Amino acid sequence: MTNEDLQNIITGLGTDLEFTTEASEFLNVIVPKEQLHHICSQLKSHPELKFDYAFCITGMDWVPALGVIYHLESTELRHQIVVKVMVDDRENPTLDSVHDIWQTADFHELEIFDFFGIKFNNHPKLRRIFLTPEWEGFPLRKDYVDEANMIIK
Amino acid sequence: MTDQQAQNKIKTEEYFINMGPQHPAAHGVLRLILTIDGEIIKNVEPDLGYIHRSIEKMCERDSYQQIVHLTDRMDYLSSHINNEAVCLTVEKGLEIEVSDRVKVIRTIIDELTRIASHCLWWGVMGMDLGALTTYFYAFRDREMINDIFEETCGARLTMNYNVPGGLMFDIHPNFVKRTKDFIAHFKTKIPEYNLLLTDNVIFHKRTKGVGILTREDAISFGVSGPVARGSGFSSDVRKHHPYSAYDRVDFKEILFTEGDTFARYQVRMMELWESVSIIEQLIDNIPEGETKAATKAVIKLPKGEFYQRVETARGELGVYINSTGNKNPYRVKFRSPGFSNLSILNHISKDVLIADLVATMASFDFVIPDIDR
């Protein structure tokens, strides 16, 4: 399915969705965070979309906004899109978990929580998966400072 | 007291033990927190980070040429393929088309890497299940590939042969002959592998019906590579999103539907034949051409997002580069096959014996630095 067709179908799934293909090989859909779970479950269940394979879930620090990028593919129809969601609150960023839609999100959300500090509602067990529980700060954020271990050029 | 009465009186209690971080069956520093009831596993919780180097953060301060060198420390058994993934992403950003010669050489070395990786996996899989001989058979043959790499790339494991725009230098004059010699040798050895382990009754009993993974779960958990193909999930990036010279070679995607440890084993064994076939199709027809397209000394990707998927020996590796137009990337993400494959482990290891978990893990072929990055 072409990006235009995808855009036409996805437009009807929610409100205030932004679409862009600029500087990316995929169709990018920017979803307001309140609608994330609803849109994602539609993306998977809609008979013409069937995005059942989340092949990459990336945490991002866009400064000041934090966010998550979901790369999705349909294993049956073989089209791909990118879903982006942003959250402005850096003190207590919270998004809805999508682990009940794509179970791979369980581990990837742990990684994002560990390195970006984004909390996920309804996640089965949010914990530090790589770092120690007492670790302070979130290392992949742009404002993270560690004078001992980081070499800034 | 009869035995039955005595058994009724025994109280059992769940408790947890650590498997790792220094467990021989993990082949690296992987810690699994097992909740067990006797010998039966109730829950598996991986605790990671023992070898985490934060490669993604290091990438944000490095130039694009430097990033290539970090990637072969992720999945060190697919180092050439990891390097290629970054190079392809950068080439996509710069809109460089590499020459046919580069594409073909990259593909040949990719497949040699895959054979070397599967050899190592086959050796240690036998070893995990108590068959030490496989290890020596596999390493004897893998050594020949490492020798070919050493001669052409200068390194045996972390090769760094790819650079953005092509290859660091041309292949060694002996490369074609030695590769052909190896293929001729290796074709007589795969049947030997099968005689030794594949047809072994004890091996069948340890692997058949163990660690069953359904196709639906494989897709939902983002499992890829031979593990996914053992469950009938057609996930081969080489087929679905061909890169380098994979669109001009004829090969089969090996699929099994049983989803058990033995199916995953068979996928890899048959992939050895496919890799041999791919190399045979290309080795006599390496086109002439330049080995490196001209790039600037300081590479700056245009503003934008670039994504490249490749098939390593373990599954799908994704490289995401977000560039703001500087000489350093703004954000780099490596979607590693090991991390996603590990997420399924708890799901398929409920109510199995600890020994079966070892067999399942062996068939997953984990490389821990790939999970930790």
Image (cartoon, grey):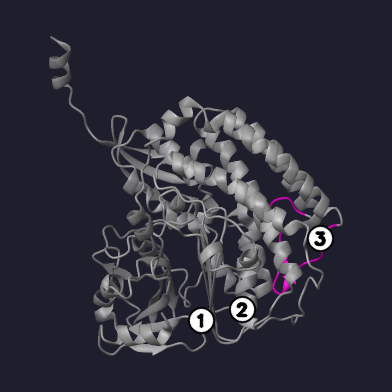
Q: Chain of mark 2?
A: B
Q: Are marks 2 and 1 in contact (CB under 8 Å)?
A: yes
**Label 2, label 1: how many angstroms apart (C-alpha)?**
10 Å
Residue B73 circle label? none
Residue A38 appears in the figure: yes
Q: Which residue is mark 3?
A: B171
Chain of the residue under label 1: A
| Secondary structure category for the residue under label 3 | loop
**Residue numbers of the magenta segment:** B155-172
CA neighbours of label 1 inside 10 A, class few (<14), some (14 to 19), many (20+): some
Residue that mark 1 sits on: A25
The three-letter code of the residue at mark 2 reads Lys
Q: Chain of mark 3?
A: B
Residue nearest the viewer, comparing A128 with B145: B145
- Quadrant of the rendered image containing residue B6: top left
**B317 left or right of B342 in image:** right
Residue B170 within the magenta-colored segment of the rendering: yes
